[in-house]
Image: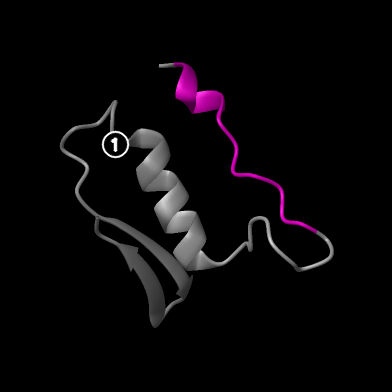
Amino acid sequence: MGRRDARPPAPERSGRGGYAPTAENLAKWIYDTWHDELPELSTVKVSETPKTWAVHRP
């Protein structure tokens, strides 16, 4: 269970390449980080506002 300490990659300040801190990227990162340890994980939904969200389904 060492992944509990995992953190998403830091966004690159220049805005080119690297990790863009979007809800879509965060949802994908959460799935990629946890799917091996949580086999029942099939979808990750990250809320952006009360009415919008990003969903990652592999």
Q: Is residue 57 above or below residue 50?
A: above
Outermost residue toward the top in this view: 1
Q: How many marks?
A: 1
What residue type is disc 1 on? His
Q: Position of residue 1 (x, y in %)?
A: 40, 16
Residue 30, above or below 58: above
- Residue at 25% x, 31% y is 38
Q: Badge 1: few (under 14), some or many (20 or more) residues near its Cα, within 10 Å?
A: few
Residue 44 highlighted magenta (yes or no): no
Q: Residue 14 occupies which quadrant of the picture? A: bottom right
The quarter of the displayed image where residue 41 is located? top left
Q: Residue at 50%, 60% (x, y): give it.
A: 25
- Magenta span includes 5: yes
Q: Quadrant of residue 50?
A: bottom left
SS for dot 1: loop
Q: Residue at x 67, y 56 (%)?
A: 18
State whether the magenta stretch is mostly helix, strand or loop.
Answer: loop
The image position of residue 4, as x and y in percent, is 48, 26
18 horizontally vs 45: left or right? right
Tell me the residue that label 1 is attached to: 35
